[in-house]
Amino acid sequence: MSRARALGFDAVGIAKLDLAEDERHLVSWLAAGFQGDMHYMQRHGSMRSHPEELAPGTVRVVSVRMNYWPAEARPANEVLSEPATAYVSRYALGRDYHKVMRRALARLAEEVATEFGRFGYRVCVDSAPVLEKALARNAGLGWIGKHTNLLSRDAGSYFFLGEILTDLPLPEDEQTTAHCGTCTACITACPTQAILGPYRLDARRCISYLTIEHHGAIPAELRRSLGNRIYGCDDCQLVCPWNKFARAATHPDFKVRHGLDSPALTELFAWTAQQFDERMRGSAIYRIGYERWLRNIAVALGNAPTSPDVLSALNARRNDPSALVREHVAWALAQHEPLQNAAQSRT
């Protein structure tokens, strides 16, 4: 544990590979079509619940947590209450966690090899087809909450997960028991009612899915519910009582960059493709690309209060080269027409 902490990890555990119940849940979830456009969820078949198929010889999984909550960021609820300000999920305010954690996990594996000798392993950070939350639960790092995120009694849920699949027969840690009780705060807080019930999430309605994973047009009937959220959503975590125990990130790479904790929507919408590339390279946001970035902000501008700045920003992109962006800009402008017409009738 001391080696893991020195590398920036906040908790580490050893998981057994028994994921039979989780596999049944995954099969049912996929059968319901809740994965939406995330076709990769089906492509790997049983590999997700059988790490030994992904890395032959695997008998244990080293699971790690790394806190990401940026203590210096403007309070999330303040930003969400200001519809002209862009809200970015708190995990994405700093550098891309994939690179940070992958490097640290590789270092940890090297240090283990120094002590135990060479061994077979594979490092995974939210990219390989593994059930990381189920493995973290098996490793004693927390339990899966009703919102389907991992929860810890001493750290809430604001953390990243990573794994080392290994052929070392390490001693297993004890699985954590659940402590959600009768609480349903996360279910009622979801802006789009994507949490259909305990442990049942329809990703097709989830704002994180819509603003990050979904490539096409955001369903018109859900756009108003996005509010000012332009990348991801934290609502189900913000209301969770266990997050009063959440710990701030200690890794410097998770500090806020480019003022993304409280930027004006009009400011971000004015970025050129080159500015997006320069500022978002090295961020998790970079993967959605410039087109979807504009799509998301257009929706938020449609939900913002009508003002000359908002209308000017939208009108500047009425003829955007992207049909996807143009459609969302047209929708956004239509949301402001009633107020514009009312103002004109008074003059």
Image: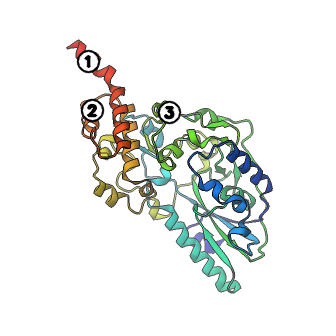
Q: Which residue is found at the position 69% from the left and 72% from the top? A: 55
Q: Residues within 10 Å of mark 2 (few under 14, many from 20)?
A: some
Label 3: which secondary element: helix
Residue 21 vs residue 207: left or right? right
Tell me the mark number nearer the camera, choosing from 3 and 1: 3
Q: Quadrant of the N terminus?
A: bottom right
Furthest-left residue in this view: 347
Label 2 and label 3: CA atoms lie apart by 21 Å
Pointer 2 with pointer 1, Cβ within 8 A: no
Question: Residue 261: percent from the left, percent from the top?
Answer: 40, 48
Q: Which mark is residue 343?
A: 1
Label 1: which secondary element: helix
Amino acid marked by disc 3: Leu
Question: Residue 10: percent from the left, percent from the top?
Answer: 60, 63
Label 2 and label 1: CA atoms lie apart by 14 Å
Q: Which residue is mark 2?
A: 311
Pick the residue in front: 237 or 330. Answer: 330
Q: Which residue is mark 3?
A: 222
